[in-house]
Image (cartoon, rainbow, N blue to C red):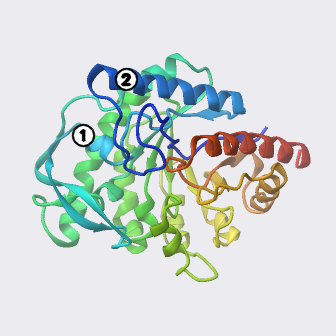
């Protein structure tokens, strides 16, 4: 059958954190919070397995935010004095921490959730990390320098730390390490020029599968409004896919369902596994198996069957839990229908 997977994040249960928020506040602290995070991780593993997904993840249940969850264990970052900054080319404002000194890991970042997930599923396990370019776009740098040179220096500093954690995740038994790089769809020229190189540095030495997730953002208003300005064809991928096709990264994700991405751009990823987004994360409407099978069928014109992975367009974190559960079930049913149709 077609492989199926989620992009990464899933909604936090109401007993763990605020719901339907991208930056939720935790409902507990200390050991109680640690237990709640573990419980939520196991809950979502079971939901993914019951839905029939072939690749599962921790749903990022132990992270308040997909970038800041990693940064919390990085020395040289000041979380006490956050500043307001426009991110993703000023698409929206966020309170971000400041880089104030040399960067180094304070220890393991995601050992608990990775080992917990590995111990409780026999399916392929994917674990997500933020990509170096996206981290650079989500912090205020006060140390590595201004301008392009400073951004590159900071990106490669983060890439080294990401590589340390990625190698440790591989040792924990993770099958796929995925780096999330939504910044690749915003700073396309820089992504091709040095972003992919920084990504490869983050993935250096990994023997497990490596992946990069490039989307048009969560289904929040700022992203929906931005998409409305992109015209009849979204061709951002066209600028970075050629560089990725030459890279050592094994898998590339793209937003497909209810997007204006020309499907023929998938041709630019020859030789890569392609995670085709068949689930809309900006709508509460549950996709039908027929819609999902049709999206897979269109992708098969440009991607070999054995290289196609049916996936969500992006993370589901800000969604209602019941909607996310229904979309996961629809994903597996649609992939099964496509398997029967295109056998």
Q: Quick one: 341 or 45, which is closer to the camera?
A: 45
Q: Position of residue 289 (x, y in %)?
A: 81, 49
Which residue is pictured at 47% across the width and 38% down the height?
12
Please provide percent x and percent y for residue 301: 79, 62
| Dot 1: element | loop
Give SS at disc 2: helix
At 45% from the left edge and 38% from the top edge, which residue is drawn?
60
Residue holding disc 2: 112
Write down the residue under mark 1.
Answer: 72
Q: How many marks?
A: 2
Around disc 2, counting alpha carbons within 10 Å, would you say few (fewer than 14), some (14 to 19), or many (20 or more)?
Answer: some
Image quarter for residue 234? bottom right
Identified at 79% across, 46% down, the residue is 334
Does residue 266 appear anywhere in the picture? yes
Looking at this view, is 200 or 146 the one in front?
146
CB contact under 8 Å: marks 2 and 1:
no
Residue 153 figure quarter: bottom left
Residue 171 showing in the rendered view:
no
Name above or below for residue 182 compared with residue 321: below
Left or right of 87, for residue 270: right
| Residue 103 percent coordinates (x, y) | 16, 45
């Amino acid at each position: 059958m077609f492989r199926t997977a989620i992009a990464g994040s899933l909604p936090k249960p109401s007993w763990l954190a605020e719901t339907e928020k991208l930056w939720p506040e935790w409902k507990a602290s200390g050991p109680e919070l640690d237990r709640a995070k573990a419980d939520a991780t196991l809950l979502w593993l079971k939901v993914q397995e019951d839905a029939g997904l072939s690749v599962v993840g921790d749903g990022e249940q132990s992270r308040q935010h997909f970038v800041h969850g990693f940064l919390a264990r990085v020395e040289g970052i000041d979380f006490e004095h956050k500043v307001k900054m426009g991110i993703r080319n000023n698409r929206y404002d966020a309170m971000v921490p400041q880089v104030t000194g040399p960067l180094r890991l304070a220890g393991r970042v995601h050992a608990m959730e990775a080992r917990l997930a590995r111990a409780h599923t026999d399916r392929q396990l994917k674990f997500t990390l933020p990509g170096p370019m996206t981290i650079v776009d989500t912090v205020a740098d006060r140390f590595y320098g201004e301008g392009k040179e400073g951004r590159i220096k900071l990106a490669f500093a983060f890439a080294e730390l990401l590589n340390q954690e990625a190698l440790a995740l591989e040792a924990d038994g993770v099958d796929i390490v995925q780096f999330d790089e939504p910044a690749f769809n915003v700073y396309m020229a820089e992504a091709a020029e040095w972003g992919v190189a920084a990504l490869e540095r983050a993935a250096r030495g990994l023997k497990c599968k490596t992946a990069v997730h490039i989307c048009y953002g969560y289904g929040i208003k700022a992203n929906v409004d931005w998409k409305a300005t992109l015209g009849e064809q979204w061709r951002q991928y066209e600028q970075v896919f050629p560089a990725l096709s030459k890279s050592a990264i094994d898998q590339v994700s793209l937003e497909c369902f209810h997007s204006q991405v020309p499907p023929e751009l998938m041709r630019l990823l020859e030789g890569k596994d392609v995670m085709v987004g068949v689930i809309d994360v900006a709508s509460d409407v549950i996709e039908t198996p027929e819609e999902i099978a049709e999206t897979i069928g269109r992708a098969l014109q440009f991607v070999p069957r054995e290289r196609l992975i049916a996936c969500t367009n992006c993370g589901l974190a800000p969604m209602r839990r019941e909607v996310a559960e229904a979309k996961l079930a629809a994903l597996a049913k649609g992939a099964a229908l496509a398997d029967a149709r295109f056998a």
